[in-house]
Structure formats: C-alpha cells, structure tokens
Image (cartoon, helix red, strand yellow):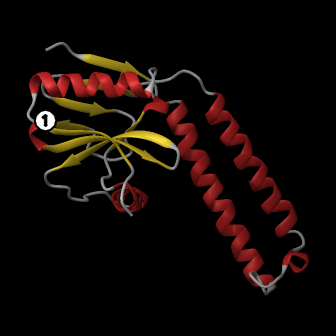
Amino acid sequence: MKTIIINKNRNYFRAITVILLILFVLYFLVFKFLRYPTEHTYFLLPTKNTVVIFSVVGILTCILVLFIFIKNIFNRNAHLKIDNHGIYNGFSFFKKKFIKWEEINSIEAIRYNNNNYIAIFLKDTSNTEKGLNYLFFKLNEISMGTPYVIFAGDLDCSFSELKRLIFEVIAKEKNIKTSVSRSPTK
C-alpha cells in the first residue's frame, strides 16, 4: 500500500479573520466593560462585580482562543498521513495522534454545525488528556460521538477528496465499518 500524505492548507484567510474578530471582541470587553462597568449592568449582569467578572473571563477566553489559533497557524509539521499501519493526524490537539488500524471500530463521514468531518470511532476510547485537552476531548465525545475527528478545512484538499482517499484505503486493506454521511446524535 502506498503512503498518502496530505499537507496543511496554506490559506490563512479564515484564521486571520477569526483572530481579528477575537481581537475586536477583546478590545470591546477591555475598554467598554471594564472602564465603565456600571453602564453595562442589566438583568443578566445585575451588578458591577458581575460585569467585571464577565469581562475578565471573556478576556481570558479570547487570549486562549488566540493562542490556539496562532499555535495552529505556525505548526509547520502538521499533516495527515495514511499508510498500512494506520492514520496519523498531526492536527489533533490530543496526545494520541497516531491511530492503528486494529484500534479502529468504524470510520464515518459526518456533518456537524455545517462542517464536514471524518469521525474515527475506536474500539476502546480512554481519556488520558490533562487540563483543557481533557475538556475538549469530552466535548468532542459528547457532541460528535468521538473525540478523534479530521476536519478537511485544515488540509490541502477538499472534503470529498479526503473521504474518497480514506474510504478507498479502508476498502482495499482493512475490515473496518464505514458510513458515508450522517449527523451525530446528541
């Protein structure tokens, strides 16, 4: 079997747009809410202290998301590799980036929040992550059914091409269940 390597998408327009949007929100929270907290009290934020707490949490969240986006943009080693041993997903935030074919129960093409993903369902999914990665692992597992997903937006190919490549490899080499399209159950 030949090795398939799909590199990172070099189109940074979407990531830069999200970063600019986050910076705008951060600016708004810092200078509007923190400078004049009494002007922004209403039934959801009834006191000055809740406005300040909301602002600080918003700022920390924006900084975290900025860090994740910038880390993703400058990660030059990120790639997807499919070979006879398994699938290596260099875009994953989790420790387990390489999944062997023997560990996979099924692979499905799913649609979630108007995005297409390749979902990899393992026979045994254990969460050994720590910190925020533990939270992201659980959120993916609850919302999509599995934490191990491949998003074609990160890759230098279309979703249909990625789906075709993965399903062809599975059809030729492995005895793994596949499903073409579904929406994850909630």
Look at 46% across and 20% down and name the residue there.
Answer: 156
Q: Is residue 96 above or below residue 167?
A: below
Residue at disc 1, secondary structure: helix
Quadrant (top left/top right/bottom left/bottom right) for the C terminus = bottom left
Q: Picture coordinates of residue 7 (x, y %)?
A: 41, 20
Q: Given the image, on which type of amino acid does mark 1 rest?
A: Trp
Q: Picture coordinates of residue 106 (x, y %)?
A: 19, 43
Disc 1 crowd, CA 10 A, few/some/many (<14, 14-19, 20+)? some
How many numbered marks have been drawn onto this rendered protein structure? 1
Left or right side of 118 for 72: right
**Residue situated furthest top in the rendering:** 2
61 or 122: nearer the eye? 122
User: Which quadrant of the view contains residue 33?
Assistant: bottom right
Left or right side of 184 for 54: right
Q: Picture coordinates of residue 95 (x, y %)?
A: 29, 46
Q: Picture coordinates of residue 74 (x, y %)?
A: 53, 30
Look at 36% across and 62% down and name the residue there.
Answer: 142
67 or 89: nearer the eye? 89
160 or 137: nearer the eye? 160
Judging by the rendered image, the residue that carries numbered circle 1 is 101
Quadrant (top left/top right/bottom left/bottom right) for the N terminus = top left
Look at 20% across and 58% down and name the residue there.
Answer: 126
User: Which quadrant of the view contains residue 101?
Assistant: top left
